[in-house]
Image (cartoon, rainbow, N blue to C red):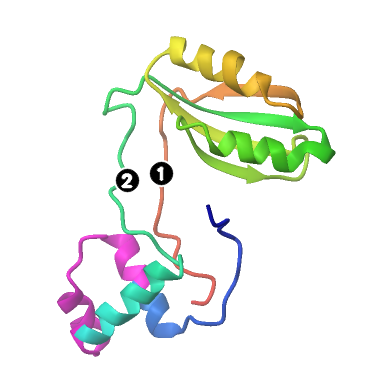
Amino acid sequence: MKKRDLNRKTENIDKIDCKIISLLQKDGRVPNTTIAKKLGISESTVRTRLDRLIKEEFIQIVAVSNPIKLGFQVVGNIRMHVDIKKTENVIRELSKLDPIWFIVQTTGGTDIYAEFIVKSLGELNILAFDKINKIDGITRTDTSLIMKFIKRKYDWGTAFD
């Protein structure tokens, strides 16, 4: 499997791309024709740019769901301390776990931060004790559960605005 670099920056983005992204962050279902009219460009230009933005992983167009409303009872995060020599192994093994949907390396008190979604405390028990704690290189974990969603925002624009 080809390893993707989610942090790779590129020069292939301009103000029009940024405006397209901003419009989609407000409403991911906005038609290309509407975007074209608002920006004064053709629909085919919007389509071509969108295809490129998706292909080059600037954006994904997905439905963002509320896991609690969809029956997942346990949503949370795990902060992990890792033996620095085994960081790549830890990341590789965590990436294989379906309940984990977000993984980042961090600075500060922990080395790796991950977010998970499971259906029950029983599934969390299996994830934490039977899977994560058995990964070679993890020296300590700290798990927190999300009790209530207060703010979830996805329209932060771009750093090029």
> Is 89 located above or below residue 26 in the figure?
above
- Residue 64, which numbered label? 2
Few, some or many residues within 10 Å of mark 1 (<14, 14–19, 20+):
few
Few, some or many residues within 10 Å of mark 2 (<14, 14–19, 20+):
few
Given residues 147 and 16, the one toward you in this image is: 16
> Is 151 located above or below residue 146 in the figure?
below
The residue drawn where x is 56% and y is 82% is 11
- Look at the image and say whether residue 87 sits in the magenta stretch: no
The amino acid at mark 1 is Arg
Given residues 96 and 104, the one toward you in this image is: 96
The amino acid at mark 2 is Val
The residues colored magenta run 21-43
The residue drawn where x is 72% and y is 43% is 88
Helix, strand, or loop for circle 1? Answer: loop
The residue drawn where x is 67% and y is 19% is 134
Judge left or right: residue 104 versus residue 31.
Answer: right
Residue 156, position as x, y percentages in the image: 45, 61
Residue 19, position as x, y percentages in the image: 37, 77
Mark 1 sits on what residue? 152
Q: How many marks?
A: 2
Measured Cα–Cα span from mark 1 to mark 2: 10 Å
- Look at the image and say whether residue 34 sits in the magenta stretch: yes
Marked residue nearer the N-terminal end (1 or 2)? 2
Helix, strand, or loop for circle 2? Answer: loop
Residue 3, position as x, y percentages in the image: 58, 56
* Predominant SS of the magenta segment: helix
Q: Are marks 1 and 2 in contact (CB under 8 Å)?
A: yes
